[in-house]
Image (cartoon, rainbow, N blue to C red):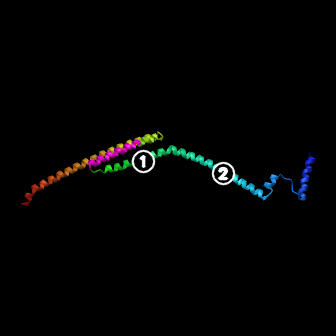
Amino acid sequence: MTDRNTSVSGALRESAEQGTPQQRHPLEMLIFGTIRGKLFLALGIVVICGVLGAVVTWNANRVVERKITAIADDNLPALVVAYRFSERMTNIASVAAALANADTAPTLESRKVLLAKHVTEARETAAALESSGVTRAGAPSLQVLVDQVDDRAQELATHVEERLSLDSRIVALIRKLTESHARFTASVEPLISH
């Protein structure tokens, strides 16, 4: 067997030395033997890499899409309700500022009614936020916050009522003083004119 292997390799060596091409597989000659074959092989590798890259990118996009959809489905309703809660609290702050500047009892009463309406809406929105799936630890603190805002609003209304009461007492005292001054001036006028 070794003689035969030696004779075959020797024949191939002799044929290579004589300039005759070695015997190769036809597919090997088609792909590796010519420049056209090598270019075709390189193009095939590039196309396969592109297809693999596209498949990987497509799978990654599907995973990202699923994650975004899950996040949106879970959190978007809570974000909308949280925005509404923020809006209600802003309305409360605006009405409280207007309530503090009330200059008459009817104005004070109308602003108290409006403030009570906004506080009620804020309570309902906090309850909706709790029911929308927000963690239980955060939502009760919103109810406590609304209760505190309501307490402060009631204190503010009480202070404004006291201020209006004092204003009316001051106006009554000034009116009484003006009348007393007018009577005094009328009683002193005959003495001064003589």
Residue visible at 38% across and 48% down in the picture:
91
In the image, what residue occupies the spot 90% across and 48% down? 5
Q: Mark 2 points at which residue?
A: 53
* Amino acid type at image mark 1: Ser
Report the disc number at residue 11: none
User: Residue most toward the right?
Assistant: 3
Residue under label 1: 86
Magenta stretch: dominant secondary structure: helix
Q: Which of marks 1 and 2 is in front?
A: 2
Q: In this view, does 94 lie to the left or right of 1?
A: left
* The one of 44 and 109 positioned closer to us in this rendering: 44
Magenta region: which residues? 104-124
Q: Which of 167 and 50 is in front in this view?
A: 50
Q: Earlier in the sequence, mark 1 or mark 2?
A: 2
Q: Does the magenta stretch include residue 95?
A: no
Q: How far apart are marks 1 and 2 (CA)?
A: 46 Å
Left or right of 146 in this view: 70: right
> Label 2 sits on what residue type?
Gly
The percent coordinates of residue 181 (x first, y second) are 15, 54
Q: What element carries label 2?
A: helix
Q: Tag 1, which secondary structure?
A: helix
